[in-house]
Image (cartoon, grey):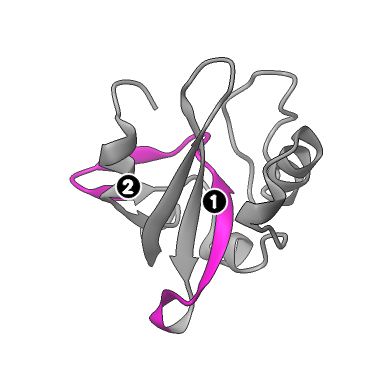
Amino acid sequence: MAEVTVRDIMDATAYDRSEAEIGPVREVFLDDASGQPTFALIGRGLFNLRSALVPLRGSRLVEGRLILSVSAEAVASAPAWSVEDGLTEDQQQRIYEHFALTDIADGKEHATDA
């Protein structure tokens, strides 16, 4: 996501790859090495009371809409995660695998049919 600020992402509403609305962006997580946004915590469900941690690989920001590269179904069934637990490399890998994204170590930026 080149030339996009954390504030831009935080002000956005997330949509799935079919552009169906999911919910508001609640938090943005940056890569320790690059400082680039890598994950977003997205509110979902009735009244957005639940949330899911979603990778930002392949996403794009269009007029305040964060279009994710994954389906709403994949977001709804995302692995449980808590801010208090932090975000370890193992947890990141589990999230990438859930969304059928390439391994975090290979550096590729594409999604498959998650």
Amino acid type of the residue that numbered disc 2 sits on in the rendered structure: Met
Quarter location, residue 7: top left
Between the C-alphas of marks 2 and 1, the distance is: 19 Å
From the top left corner, tell me how far across and down residue 5 is, in percent: 30, 30
Disc assigned to residue 33: none
Please state, as top left, top right, bottom left or bottom right, where the N terminus lies in the image.
top left
Image position of 64 (left or right of 73): left
Say above or below: 36 vs 76: above
Crowd rating for badge 2 (residues with CA inside 10 Å; few <14, some 14–19, many 20+): some
Amino acid type of the residue that numbered disc 1 sits on in the rendered structure: Val
From the top left corner, tell me how far across and down residue 65 is, in percent: 27, 51
Camera-side residue of 107 and 29:
29
Image position of 60 (left or right of 27): left
Camera-side residue of 19 and 77:
77
Residue at 44%, 84% (x, y): give it.
46
Residue 58 falls inside the magenta stretch: yes
Residue 20 visible: no
Tag 1 residue: 70
Q: Residue furthest front?
A: 84
Q: Residue furthest left?
A: 63
Residue 35 visible: yes
Residue at 73%, 18% (x, y): give it.
106
Image position of 55 (left or right of 96): left
Residue at 72%, 60% (x, y): give it.
79
Residue 55 falls inside the magenta stretch: yes
Task: Determine whether the residue tagged by mark 1 lies in a helix, strand or loop.
Answer: loop
Say above or below: 5 vs 99: above
Say above or below: 76 vs 42: below
Tag 2 residue: 10
